[in-house]
Amino acid sequence: MTVKILQRILLLFFFTISTPLQAVEKPVDIHLSFQPDLKNGKRVYEICATCHLPEGWGNSDGGYPQIAGQHQSVLVKQLLDIRSGFRENPAMYPFVQERTMGGYQDMADVVAYIARLPMHPRHAKGPWSDLSKEFQQGKKLYNDKCARCHGALGEGKNIGAIPRLYGQHYAYLLRQLELVHKGIRKVNPAMKAIVDSVPDDKLQKIANYVSWLAVPEDKKAPSLNWRNPDFK
């Protein structure tokens, strides 16, 4: 399957034309397509596996997200955003540079590989179960504020690079919402406005609800003992 890199490369191709008014030009859309090589994607992923784990499951404390099973376009966008400096991530920045990861073909290969990894069978969930009032409050907030883009089930969309949310660790979800709220993580203006409209205690309830969204059986590994045979 062709991986379509339909990405607004904000800083790589974001330029200013010198005029008396110092007008800023609009971002340029670059459309590229590559046929992924999963064998090479596995090789490139060895750069990522030290932190994200060979399975792509990240860790429960929110330091590293689960990336297994994420949409290809989302993975590409984040890699390019970090590579360009648009998304601040000092720990990851050196590893996504072309001299380390490779060019666009290598990027296409590795995101295709990651997208095919099964997800954690028991990722870290928030403190409030579906029997709690906090869960129900989080559900209502999610449906009112987030579901229109991310989907009622947290499935996201490959077209448009909207992240798949189900299966993500609670601590990571909450940390990203807090970074957006503080203006540290840059996102599109619509999402920024939504996050800013929600008080901190309610952001916790949204993150909690999302962390409890069911991961489809065909998307997750059968057990914690599952190991990617490519790494044996």
Image: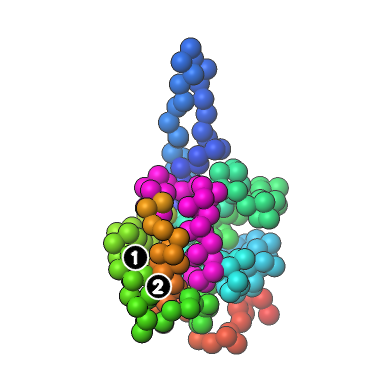
Where is residue 90 drawn, in percent x and y? 67, 51
Q: Residues within 10 Å of mark 1 (few under 14, many from 20)?
A: many
Point 52% across, 17% down: residue: 18
Whether residue 137 appears in magenta in the rendering, the answer is no
Residue 76 in view in this figure: no
Point 56% across, 44% down: residue: 86
Looking at the image, residue 145 sits to the left or right of residue 83; the answer is left
Amino acid type, callout 2: Tyr
Amino acid type, callout 1: Tyr
Residue beneath label 1, please?
142
Q: Quadrant of the N terminus?
A: bottom left
Point 45% across, 35% down: residue: 28
Residue at disc 2, secondary structure? helix
Residue beneath label 2, please?
209
Whether residue 188 appears in magenta in the rendering, the answer is yes
Looking at the image, residue 156 sits to the left or right of residue 125; the answer is left
Indicate which disc residue 169 carries.
none
Circles 2 and 1: CB atoms closer than 8 Å = yes
Q: Quadrant of the C terminus?
A: bottom right
Residue 168 in view in this figure: yes
Q: Which residues are magenta?
A: 168-195
